[in-house]
Amino acid sequence: MPFLAHVGVLRKHLFRSLIAVCAGAALIGYKMHFIMDNIIFGPVHKDFITFKVMNYVSRLFSSSDVFVMPEQFPIQVRRIFEQLNTAFYIALVGGFILAFPYVIYEIWKFISPGLKPSEKKNSLAFFVTTYFLFILGCCFGYFLVTPLTMHFGYFFNLSETIKVNIDLSSYIGVLLQTVLGMGLVFLLPIIVYVLTSIGILTPKFLKTYRRHAVVIILIIAGFITPGDIPSMLVASLPLYLLYETSILVSSIVYKRNQPDSRELISP
């Protein structure tokens, strides 16, 4: 097909993906009150599952709860259209997350005609793994990093005269930054897989610069989280495990791409 024909086909796939995102955003908007009360503000509820589990574990060793949130988390709005802008923002991001599997499907449909049968099978597994790691990272950020971050931010106190009132935009920014940031960094093994497949990365390189990677991981964790030390440490641990997993992935791909020694012997 000519280049412009490919562009035309790609435009159709992108248009259908955009419709799916808009449909997901409409669904999020329709259930906005439920989503705000039960999902967006879930990590600051006193009965959030993370706090329940951690308090249950703490009661095994002591008689008091470690994580206690207030009855009403102090969220405030100081700009007249802040709630409206937040609603559009949440609907758009939520619609993209809901439609993400379909977007991956449209991308696969666009590239699949140029693939061999074995490559089609591998590419489908590649996209499924990508989506799984992204959702796993989002869940880790939502269920672990975010509630610990909010708990620390709320109870950290410089003076008794300071009254805690958190802006809605600040809360939403921290929440989405943490959740989406963790979702993206959990794609590290996929990125390493691609770079090793095209010959840019090697397992030797990743092993040699392991100590440097620890510093980079701490910097990335600082960008993902609001910057407090507890949240950085919680976010850094899975990132380091992902780095070690990436070394394993790179080793497997690197060995697979090496030519068989028997093929190097001339007849």
Image (cartoon, rainbow, N blue to C red):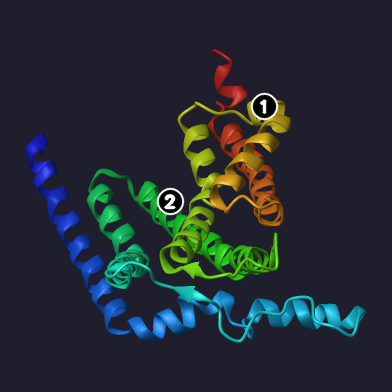
Residue 179 image offset from top left, x and y in percent: 50, 61
Query: Which residue sits at x=60%, y=23%?
Result: 262
Q: Which mark is residue 122?
A: 2
Amino acid type, mark 2: Asn
> Between residues 199 and 187, which one lies in front from this camera angle?
187
Q: Secondary structure at mark 1?
A: helix
Residue 70 image offset from top left, x and y in percent: 63, 82
Which is nearer the N-term, disc 2 or disc 1?
2
> Between residues 23 and 128, which one lies in front from this camera angle?
23
Residue 150 image offset from top left, x and y in percent: 60, 67
Decide if residue 75 is on the left or right side of residue 55. left
Residue 232 image offset from top left, x and y in percent: 66, 51
**Can you say which quadrant of the picture contains the N terminus?**
top left
Which residue lies under the disc numbered 1? 204
Exactly how many numbered labels are in the figure?
Answer: 2
Residue projecting furthest to the front: 161
> Between residues 119 and 27, which one lies in front from this camera angle?
27
Query: Which residue sits at x=53%, y=79%?
Result: 42
**On screen, residue 199 above or below 265:** below
**Can you say which quadrant of the picture contains the C terminus?**
top right
